[in-house]
Image: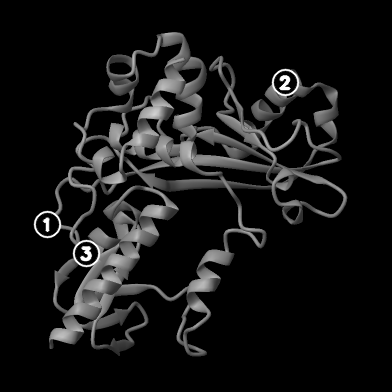
Amino acid sequence: LRVAVLRRKMKRLKVSDVFAREEITTADALSTRWGFSPTMIDRFFRPFLGGITLDPDLHASSRMFEFVFKMFSEGRATLPAGGMQSLPDLIAAPLPTGSVRLNTAVARIEESSVILESGERIDASAVIVATHAPAAERLGVISDTPATPTSGLGEVCFYYAAPSSPTDGPTLVLNGTGDGPITNLSVPSDVAPGYAPRGESLVCVVVVGLPDEADEVLQQRVRAQLGRWYGPITAEWRMLRSYRIAYGLPDQAPPFLSPRDADVRVRPGLYRCGDWAATASINGAMRSGRRAAEALAADLAAA
């Protein structure tokens, strides 16, 4: 019933209203603002929201929690059929051939010029720095935003090919007991079949945080937990790849979203964007990028 109340309230609020509410931690909002019990918080919200924000302690901003819950209440969680790479591919598609350089490190920015680590200088009419917060700090474009965290939250992801899906439909499986390293498990191929090797299912296991143990040792514990959940069939799951992501998301503890959007204009000719400058999400990153582009367009029109 309390989840229903929360859902109804979030659907009625405008997004702007959500970000105007007092910013406290998610843990405080769940217990004091919404009246959820410690059991409900520990068994559902901690693994659910902890997997979204990479913050199982629920220190993240209540504004982010309520925004995310509003989005889930109003629409569906989806995956692009061609994989997440489809998103940058679509953005890059209209660009001239050869205009995108990959694996090319930037050393510094001078006025409206970019100096590569190779020493090459690229002159432009304007520069937009679209990076995660540590790189933006190194390039000197967020020193005036003290609320922006430059330390990130990490995770380890394991991908397995299974003979069949262990879940009954597109389901997010949460570790509601807190026992074992797994935070959540999903089967992306239950949503987008093309994600999996032919004739198999793709199982994704997420461990929030960056355990000190090597991935090989961590995987042994993950395997043991999978066996307790689904039985000996998991021994047939074929390990595909693991990813240790040191900076998966910025730390979103208050006052991360006060205000919601960081100023994207450093000065005319220099702009910044990223999920650290809005909500830490694909939505926030693209919103921030659009705002930076609009600021640049406005400055060019006024010049």
The image shows residue 80 at horizontal and vertical percentages of 61, 58
State if disc 1 and disc 3 touch (CB < 8 Å).
no
- The label number, if any, that marks residue 229 in the structure image: 2
Report if residue 111 is visible in the image: no
How far, Cα to Cα, is label 3 from label 1? 11 Å
Report which quarter residue 15 is drawn in.
Answer: top left
* Precedes in sequence: disc 2 or disc 1: 1
* Precedes in sequence: disc 3 or disc 1: 1
What residue is shown with label 3? 264
Report which quarter residue 41 is drawn in.
Answer: top left
How far, Cα to Cα, is label 2 from label 1? 48 Å
Query: Looking at the image, which residue is at 80% across and 30% down?
Result: 234
**Mark 1: few/some/many CA within 10 Å (<14, 14-19, 20+):** few
Secondary structure beneath label 2 = helix
Amino acid type of the residue tagged 2 in the rendering? Trp
The image shows residue 286 at horizontal and vertical percentages of 39, 61
- The label number, if any, that marks residue 113 in the structure image: none
* Precedes in sequence: disc 2 or disc 3: 2
Tell whether 285 sits left or right of 237: left
Q: Nearer the viewer, residue 208 or 68?
A: 68
What residue is shown with label 1? 144
**Mark 2: few/some/many CA within 10 Å (<14, 14-19, 20+):** few
Q: Nearer the viewer, residue 228 or 72?
A: 72
For marks 3 and 1, give the one nearer the viewer.
Answer: 3
Asked if 40 appears above or below 61 in the picture, the reply is: above
Asked if 196 appears above or below 54 in the picture, the reply is: below
Report if residue 199 is visible in the image: yes
Query: Looking at the image, which residue is at 29% across and 69% down?
Result: 129
Secondary structure beneath label 1 = loop
The image shows residue 116 at horizontal and vertical percentages of 33, 79
Q: Nearer the viewer, residue 110 or 213?
A: 110
Amino acid type of the residue tagged 3 in the rendering? Val
